[in-house]
Image: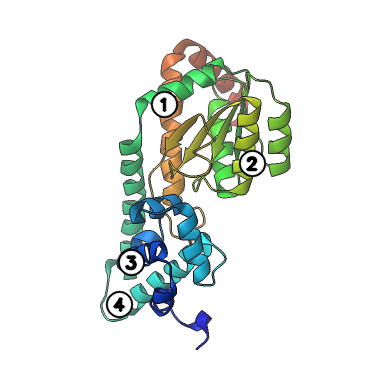
Amino acid sequence: MDEQNISILDRIHASYYQLAAAERKVADYVLSQYRQVQFMSITQLAEECGTADATVSRFCRSLKLKGFNAFKLELAKYAAASTAEGLRSRPTPTNTPEGRCAEAGRLSQEAIDQTIALVRMADIEKTVSIFEGADRVFCMGAGGSMLLANECAHLFSTVCNKFSAIWDSHMQMSITATMNLNDVIVLFSYSGATQSGVEVLELAQKRGIRTVLITRYPKSPAAKLAEVVLCCGSSESPFQFGSVPAKVAQLVLLDVLFQEYLHRNKEACEESLQRIADALSEKHI
């Protein structure tokens, strides 16, 4: 039978005894926890299995997959298919518009609760201190994360003029290569594993540039390079590509930073907000 036509769990069972001992640890964990694994980073899975990241990569290649992301995609397909089979036999609240509305609200609220639980005020205060001492703050990201970086620049631009968003990945590298040592990078990367983000942080580290990372995964490749790592809640499946709850989680973390900055710079911020309000007053009907 064509391997592409059988489920990922069946492929694991079929190749189980051809796997190395360490890879079997990964197989055992995946077979028992496949729904959870689709939300994990490669480092999280390796830690749960008591193995190295490289072992997880070899396990994925043993299944004739290109890598860990391809493996998670197969798990997500299997989980979605098995859930769909179950839904055919019984009604669920999400089968109605009202149920889907309630579910959307529940997921966003969970993302908020998880993020607040992960907030470490010492890291928030350190980040705000870095912002206060910076000449310029460049907000960066890739794909959907760049939308959050742009929101960061927009939000802070209402209280100071040092924040700007850099959209293009080539420009991000160029600016990192030429910025002053008193400039700062804020990188938004939900996965912490995008190539462009890791490249920016590697160059920043080499040059001695201060960096702040906002991510879901505190042990991701990007997290190993950033000076400060701020973690948001909400878990995405490989099919979601920047879900609303994930964005909500990052926005909550951004607002925590903003409110702390306002609190510590109240007079200057209030003056800036008043000037902007006056300047925009003619723009409203």
Are discs 3 and 2 less than 8 Å apart at CB? no
Q: Quadrant of the C terminus?
A: top right
Write down the residue under mark 4. Answer: 86
Return the disc, 3 or 2, that comes first in the chain's sequence. Answer: 3
Are discs 4 and 3 less than 8 Å apart at CB? no
Mark 3: amino acid? Asp
Q: Nearer the viewer, residue 35 or 202?
A: 202
Spatial CA distance of label 4 from label 2 is 43 Å
Q: Quarter-wise, where is residue 34 in the image?
A: bottom left
Return the disc, 3 or 1, that comes first in the chain's sequence. Answer: 3
* Badge 3 element: helix
Q: Quarter-wise, where is residue 98 in the image?
A: bottom left
Spatial CA distance of label 4 from label 1 is 43 Å
**Disc number for residue 28:** 3
Spatial CA distance of label 2 from label 1 is 24 Å
Return the disc, 4 or 1, that comes first in the chain's sequence. Answer: 4
Write down the residue under mark 1. Answer: 124
Q: Position of residue 112 (x, y in %)?
A: 35, 42
Spatial CA distance of label 4 from label 3 is 24 Å
On screen, residue 37 versus residue 239, left or right, reads left
Callout 2 environment at 10 Å: few (<14), some (14 to 19), or many (20+)?
A: some
Q: Position of residue 129 (x, y in %)?
A: 48, 18
